[in-house]
Every structure is written in C-alpha cells, then in structure tokens.
Amino acid sequence: MTGKKGKQNLKEMLQMPTKELSDLLREEAAKLGLNTHIIVVRFGGEYEPSKVTKFKNGIYEIVLSGLSILFDNLRSTLRHELYHIYDGHLEGKRSFIKYLFIQEPRAVIYQYLGIKL
Ligand SMILES: [Zn+2]
C-alpha cells in the first residue's frame, strides 16, 4: 500500500481502540507467562521501527511501528518484541554480536513458529 490511500488507512488503523491493543498484549504476554503490569505498548510513527526498551524503573516499552500496522503484522510484531523480554535479551550487558546471531533469530523463530528456544 502506498500513496494517499495507504496513509489514510494507516491513520484510521492507528486509532485502534486502546482496549483492543491491551487485549492483544494480555493474550500474547500470557503465552510467555509475562506480567503485563511492567509492559507498556504504544504505536510508533510510520517509519519508526518496532522495538522494545527497558527503563531504569523496570518498565518495558514496546513500540509497534506504523508499518507493522499497515501490513497487518501487529500480533506478529508484538510476539517478536515480547520474546525479547521473555528471553532476557534486555538484561545485563548488551552485545551486538549476540543480538545479531542469537537473540534476534530466536525472537524471529518465536514470532513465526511459536517455538521457545
Ligand atoms: Zn528483534
């Protein structure tokens, strides 16, 4: 989807009711046994990549990119970011090599196949 129509649809989709989004979070977090009280989810801008960040107060923030909404990948993207939390990828010292070759592939495998490695 490109052009004006795509943008219009994205705008509409970004107005997804908060309840719908929190239901989705609760459903997917439960599959991983994660506590939703320490996770907040928000929509990012159209070109903002999806990501998860851990704040000093222990709260995780998941950003769902506008593109994941446009391509109807909301649940899938949420599963990916939740797996990073579940598998402890945001804890301790970060390593880009570890992220690239271990953590990211694990999150992708869970995202699409539901396998927890
Ligand atoms: Zn990832």
Image (cartoon, rainbow, N blue to C red):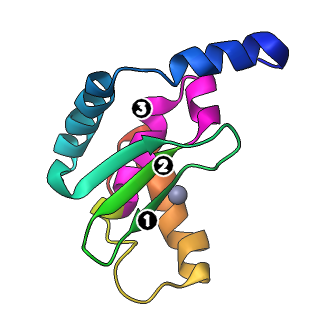
Label 1 Cα neighbours within 10 Å, binned few <14 / some 14-19 / many ≥20:
some
Could you say which disc has been placed on residue 53 in the image?
1
Circle 3: residue type: Arg
Q: Which residues are magenta?
A: 65-84
Image quadrant occupied by the N terminus: top right
Residue in view at x 25 percent, y 24 percent: 19
- The residue under label 3 is 75
- Is the residue marked 2 within 8 Å of ligand 1, measured from its CB? no
Label 3 Cα neighbours within 10 Å, binned few <14 / some 14-19 / many ≥20:
some
- The residue under label 2 is 63
Residue 98 found in image quarter: bottom right
Circle 2/circle 1 CB separation < 8 Å: yes
Element assignment for label 3: helix
* Placement of 19 over or under 12, stated as above or below: below
Element assignment for label 1: strand
Residue in view at x 47 percent, y 31 percent: 74
Of residue 14 and residue 79, the one placed in the foreground of this image is 14
Q: Earlier in the sequence, mark 2 or mark 3?
A: 2
Q: Please tell me whether mark 2 or mark 3 is closer to you in this view.
A: 2
Of residue 57 and residue 52, the one placed in the foreground of this image is 57
**Residue 21 among magenta residues:** no
Classified by dominant secondary structure, the portion drawn in magenta counts as: helix
Circle 1: residue type: Thr
Label 2 Cα neighbours within 10 Å, binned few <14 / some 14-19 / many ≥20:
many
**Residue 76 among magenta residues:** yes
Residue 31 found in image quarter: top left
Q: Residue furthest top?
A: 5
Q: CA distance from mark 2 to mark 3?
A: 12 Å
Task: Residue 33: tell me if it is visible.
Answer: no
